[in-house]
Image (tube, coloured by chain):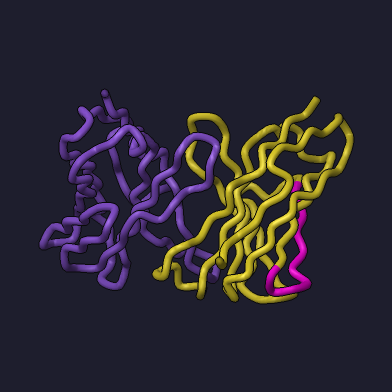
Chain colours: A yellow, B purple
Amino acid sequence: DGGITQSPKYLFRKEGQNVTLSCEQNLNHDAMYWYRQDPGQGLRLIYYSQIVNDFQKGDIAEGYSVSREKKESFPLTVTSAQKNPTAFYLCASSIGTDANYGYTFGSGTRLTVV
Amino acid sequence: DAKTTQPNSMESNEEEPVHLPCNHSTISGTDYIHWYRQLPSQGPEYVIHGLTSNVNNRMASLAIAEDRKSSTLILHRATLRDAAVYYCILRDFPWGSGTYKYIFGTGTRLKVLA
């Protein structure tokens, strides 16, 4: 079955470390997105990519980086510059970029700073 | 900011219908209305979407007002598994972004009572 796979499900980071969250999709979707969710809050957009080798900052990109070398993959790196990285991270994809076809979400990665 | 307004929380008894309202007074003529739900520690799950006419699928029904400025998600018989946060979403085209995006609000937390 097609879908989005996020790994790992849980991730622990020490202060000052960079960590990378994986997102892979086999839906042949062009656009991919990374969201952050804090407890009791809605989703906030970190980065998005409409095509391979291209990506744009979302609303809260500071302290994060991404790459889109393959259509299927959109990894997110949480850098040491992100001062409050503990959150639930969600990856999504969509067929096109006009947002009328809906998004497919992964099951999320919960990142905790220890 | 999200383009939709929803109540923060609602309660329903099990096996009874639930009507979840959403206001979207600034909707444009080509915007679809999307509904997603999110169970605890999971990614949002697609529920239903529509443009002008009422829509039905195996999960729910979507009733859209004639002027399209509001809509209602209808769960015909709520079960305990329907307890989740329900998001009503329109696409947005933030100035300067160059693309459409989903803007998530905080949604409606549905509690189902046994």
Residue B94 position within the rendered picture, expressed as x and y whole percent measured from the top left:
48, 61
A102 or B56, nearer to the observer = B56
Q: Is residue B93 left or right of residue A16?
A: left
The image quadrant that residue B53 belongs to is bottom left
Q: Residue at x 10, y 62 (%)?
A: B66
Outermost residue, right side: A16
Q: Residue at x 56, y 67 (%)?
A: A2
Q: Is residue B113 a member of the stretch shown in magenta?
A: no
A82 or B16, nearer to the observer = B16
Q: Residue at x 22, y 43 (%)?
A: B21
Residue B102 position within the rendered picture, expressed as x and y whole percent measured from the top left:
46, 57
The image quadrant that residue A99 belongs to is bottom left
Start-end of magenta stretch? A64-72
Which corner quadrant holds the N terminus of chain A?
bottom right
Residue A113 position within the rendered picture, expressed as x and y whole percent measured from the top left:
77, 29
A21 or A43, nearer to the observer = A21
Residue B40 position within the rendered picture, expressed as x and y whole percent measured from the top left:
49, 34
For residue A73, above or below residue B82:
below
Which corner quadrant holds the C terminus of chain A?
top right
Q: Main secondary structure of the magenta part?
A: loop
